Image: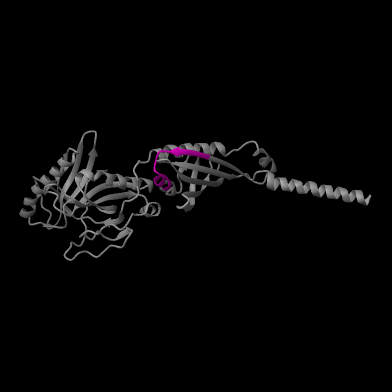
Amino acid sequence: MKGIIRVLIIIVVVVLGLGAAGYFFVLPNKYTSTQTFTVERPVDQVYAYLAATPAGEKVGDVTITEVTDVDAQARQIEAVVAFADGETGEATYTVASEGAGSQVTVVFERPIGANPLTRLNAMSKNEVEPVALAASESLNDTLGELTNVPIAGLSYEIVQVGSKPFLYNENCSPIAPAQIKEAVAQSLLVLQPLMRRYTLEQDGPPIAVETSWNEEQNQYCFQIGYAFRGTPPTIYAGGRVGRTPEGRAMRVHYEGTEENVIPTYDQMEALAQIARLDLGKSFEVYFDDPAAAGGSANRDIFYLIENGDPARLAEVAPSAGPVPQSSLVIGPATATEAPAAPPAEGAPATTPPAPAEGEKK
């Protein structure tokens, strides 16, 4: 009898052990779904955009609550996500080259809980799969809207620019480079007699502020003039008085012709897009004579940052190198790639920016 009882006990223990083993090792403890898609955008750009995902961004039916790990070498991003019912899980994005584009693999995981019936049900029904599918479709659409411009190779810094009194000419011209150069030259020539008449001291190089750029209408509108020292006059003809723009800005130094400047603007806009920065006015500071034959070939380009965290830009798409220092002191940098060099002897003490509304050049 004792032998039978012992055998029964052994059988019970074995059954319980098998049940426990099945519970822990056979029944799934989380829902997992992997989705893969390709997008015709450069791999570095796609990775950088995903790595800059801010907390609170919705992807399909889930919300990214926190990016927990970013591995630039593996091009992998891990994040905590909140599902529509309030439960939390994890998402992993992995980006790889696919020809000239990118392959994105998205893995969503959601804990199932301790209920064995729920775990048993999970063997036949993956509740996270439709969520992962919707998220990958949403990501595919979003990434496909990125500007298809390589972001590598641009040297930039984030600076703080201050405002100054500004004497300027406001007008529009066709967007052809030759017409822009002529518009700049005429505007500055018109302003010089006013500077002399009212004994205004030029405070830095000429400045051009873009107020609009419309390729469909073949129109570039601008404010071009000089920051100045002196008593602001009342101007009735030939110019206006205002103030240069101020705030955080992305600065790039450009040396080249007007004909070749557009790709630099495109790169600046692409960098801002992947870092989720909203850009405002753009303006240029000329370090040679833009009214001379051929126009300016040495300038700084500024884009004001209206919203977003510039530090994210340096994290996901670092500058290709230090920005050549100009003869101006721009002001305290908020996120520079290299410390500012001291101003050249005799250089003005502060940088001129510029006014009005602007988008891109």
Choose between 298 and 239: the one closer to the eye: 298
Q: Position of residue 87 (x, y in %)?
A: 56, 45
Q: Residue at x 16, y 42 (%)?
A: 180
* In magenta segment, residue 46: yes
Choose between 38 and 228: the one closer to the eye: 38
Task: Quadrant for residue 200, please give it.
Answer: bottom left
Q: Is residue 218 visible?
A: yes
Choose between 154 and 231: the one closer to the eye: 154
Q: Position of residue 153 (x, y in %)?
A: 33, 51
Task: Quadrant for residue 346, please give it.
Answer: bottom left
Q: In the figure, 114 relative to 231: above or below?
A: above
Query: Is 358 displayed left or right of 337 in the figure?
Result: left
The residue lying furthest to the top in this view is: 216
Q: Residue at x 24, y 65 (%)?
A: 342
Task: Quadrant for residue 333, please give it.
Answer: bottom left
Q: Is residue 358 visible?
A: no
Q: Position of residue 303 (x, y in %)?
A: 28, 49
The residue lying furthest to the front in this view is: 99
Query: Is 268 displayed left or right of 34 in the figure?
Result: left
Q: How is the image coloured?
A: one colour
Choose between 350 and 336: the one closer to the eye: 336
The stretch in magenta equals 35-47
Q: In the figure, 339 relative to 115: above or below?
A: below
* In magenta segment, residue 177: no
Q: Position of residue 146 (x, y in %)?
A: 37, 41
Query: Is 8 displayed left or right of 222 in the figure?
Result: right
